[in-house]
Image: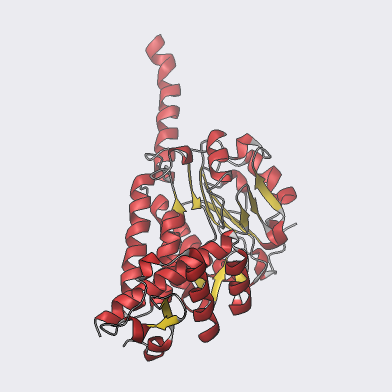
Amino acid sequence: MRNKSDPQKTNHGEADPLNAIAVGLEANFDCQTRLAYKYRSDNVYAPLLKSGLKLQVIAGSDDMKKVIGSAFKISNSNYITGCGHGGSDAYYGYKNDLIFAVKSYDRRNVQDKIIHFLSCRNAQELGPDLVSSGCSAFFGYNNDFVFHVKYADIFFECDAQIDLGFAAGLMAEEVHNKVIATFDKYIQQFRDNNQSYEAAALAYNKRILRSPVLDSNLGCKNARLESPSVWRRALNWIAEGLTLRPKSTM
Amino acid sequence: MFPVEQWGLPVSFSADQTKLVTLHEYLTPGFASIPVENLTLPQRIQIAVQRIQLQPESDLATINDGILGKARMIQEIQAGTDLGASLLEIEQEATNLIIAAARKE
């Protein structure tokens, strides 16, 4: 189904979702989601891959429930990030195809995963619902995420600290603090340049950011994304244990 | 550099609540105006709408709606939608920052 010649359907990293540790869901169909995807492709997904994270990005017309549903069920991903339209109770993919809605998804697709959506309003109801279904931490916004197109990269960079922070192995609380520090840095820069509207819009996004640090119903402050090396180590320990156990019990 | 066009834009109301007050008037010693923190919601809406109308087109966008444009921004603020409330909040914060910056000029 995936056409690799179509730039809207760029597939980063592992082609096989079975091996994916992180999954990116990119609506990528209108000006704003295309702009965000372009930024995130270069500044989120590329560094994530560089950090050694196995990554599957499902973008454009592949970002539809019927396409990603089966992949999710068998995926061992433990991190989901994405950019798409949002409502208080739903996250949408390509051309507003419904991806997640309150009480309307396979719990296995969210259990024990950290989830971050660069979208509008998802932190109101969808985030808490995903957490009640086993998602370990949710980062999102409880109102409309705004940006000035001319400075879109700065607005997206603040949000990108969520993905980059988790990829660096930080805990949710540390990630939250990193995002806030980035917001503060750019708000001050805009103020220093007398760009009051840009500063006010960025300060607004900072206020509507929600995470486990601010809302206990958005998961655990200590949640962190285990790095592939940690997974490998854990698998080695399990393998060693399985090998050793028969000897020790004899 | 402080944007000079801001001096002529409204930031508040006169003390008798009959007319809009520009930034220049607001910061003129002895000029009787309502402190911005005491403005009512209808007054804040009227000021925000005026400010949007008097300024060049904005490139403010949302992930859901893309670039909003002046007409849509005014419509949302006047209709009191959730998005309108957000836009009003941003407009007010920007105005407060402009007043603070102007005081230093």
| In the depicted structure, whether residue A37 falls above or below residue A170 | below
| In the depicted structure, whether residue A9 falls above or below residue A133 | below
Q: Given the current orientation, which residue lies at the most extreme front position?
A: B16
Residue A1: x and y in percent read: 75, 56
Q: Of A168 and A131, which appears nearest the observer?
A: A131
Residue A222: x and y in percent read: 37, 39
Residue A111 visible within the image: yes
Which quarter of the image is occupied by the C terminus of chain A? top left
Quarter where residue A38 is shown:
bottom right
Residue located at (64% from left, 65% from top)? A28
| In the depicted structure, whether residue A95 falls above or below residue A7 | above
| In the depicted structure, whether residue A15 falls above or below residue B17 | above
Q: Of A182 and B33, which appears nearest the observer?
A: B33
Residue located at (38% from left, 75% from top)? B15
Q: Given the current orientation, which residue lies at the most extreme top position?
A: A250
For this view, does A173 lie left or right of residue B18? left
Q: Of A217 and A161, which appears nearest the observer?
A: A217
For this view, does A46 lie left or right of residue B66? left
Q: Given the current orientation, which residue lies at the most extreme bottom position?
A: B4
Residue A59: x and y in percent read: 64, 60
Residue located at (40% from left, 69% from top)? B93
For this view, does A68 lie left or right of residue A214? right
For this view, does A2 lie left or right of residue A163? right
Residue A51 visible within the image: no
User: Colour scheme of this structure image?
Assistant: secondary structure
Residue located at (33% from left, 79% from top)? B32
Total numbered circles: 0
Residue B17: x and y in percent read: 44, 75
